């Protein structure tokens, strides 16, 4: 099992894993991304997103997509994990832990003050895993989102 930085040739694999994740989260119909979108948003010169692939015998079995955020209180960048997904056959095999550890090491090596992510409140296996590795829930914060028509309406009002 190995983790490597994704490259442009992985765009279709990343999209397939995104679709698998969305299906797991009962939201497959919400995936609008195309392979061209992945290429543009993860691998273009101006990309702010990054991806890792975990392979077993050269077969992709998991991925992580992340970007840098910023903490004004710490005065440092942080790593924000947007998506982590492990194919069902490789869950509980160390793939998720290896991806998370790789990102944690990346954060430490780059002087980041935090490594953060969100988890669906019904995903108890993920919550248990995150607590097992020492992560602490930030229950005092609530996530808000503007998207689609609401985003456009607010931006143009």
Image (tube, rainbow, N blue to C red):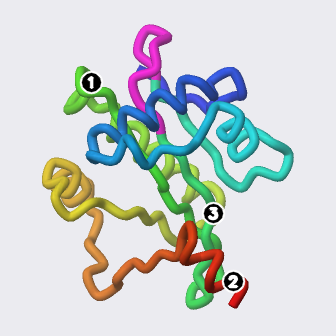
Residue at image x 59%, y 24%? 12
Residue 75 coordinates in the image, percent (x, y): 65, 84
Q: CA distance from mark 3 to mark 2?
A: 24 Å
Image position of 130 with respect to 111: above or below:
above
Residue indicated by mark 1? 90
* Magenta span dominant secondary structure: strand
Query: Considering the image in quadrants, where does the C terminus appear?
Result: bottom right
Q: Decide which of 114, 69 is in the foreground and name it.
A: 69
Mark earlier in primary sequence (3, 2): 3
Image position of 84 with respect to 53: above or below:
below
Residue 48 coordinates in the image, percent (x, y): 71, 55
- State which quadrant residue 33 falls in: top right
Residue indicated by mark 3? 68
Q: CA distance from mark 3 to mark 1?
A: 27 Å
Residue 98 coordinates in the image, percent (x, y): 39, 37
| Crowding at mark 3 (Cα within 10 Å: few <14, some 14-19, many 20+) | some
Residue at image x 54%, y 77%? 150
Residue at image x 32%, y 27%? 87
Mark earlier in primary sequence (3, 1): 3
Q: CA distance from mark 1 to mark 2?
A: 43 Å
Query: Considering the image in quadrants, where does the N terminus appear?
Result: top left
Q: Decide which of 108, 8 is in the foreground and name it.
A: 8
Mark earlier in primary sequence (1, 2): 1
Q: Are marks 3 and 2 in contact (CB under 8 Å)?
A: no
Residue indicated by mark 2? 155
> Mark 1: which secondary structure?
helix
The part of the chain drawn in magenta is 55-63
Q: Is residue 16 magenta?
A: no
């Amino acid at each position: 099992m190995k983790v490597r930085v994704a490259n442009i040739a992985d765009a279709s694999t990343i999209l397939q894993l995104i679709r698998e994740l969305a299906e797991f989260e009962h939201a497959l119909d919400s995936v609008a991304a195309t392979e061209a979108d992945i290429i543009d948003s993860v691998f273009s010169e101006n990309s702010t997103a990054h991806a890792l692939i975990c392979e077993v015998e050269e077969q992709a079995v998991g991925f992580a997509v992340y970007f840098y955020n910023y903490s004004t209180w710490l005065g440092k960048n942080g790593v924000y994990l947007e998506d982590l997904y492990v194919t069902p056959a490789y869950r509980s095999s160390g793939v998720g832990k290896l991806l998370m550890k790789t990102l944690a090491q990346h954060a430490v090596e780059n002087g980041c003050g935090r490594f953060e992510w969100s988890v669906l409140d019904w995903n108890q296996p993920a919550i248990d895993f995150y607590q097992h590795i020492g992560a602490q829930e930030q229950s005092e914060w609530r996530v808000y989102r503007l998207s689609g028509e609401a985003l456009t309406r607010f931006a143009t009002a």
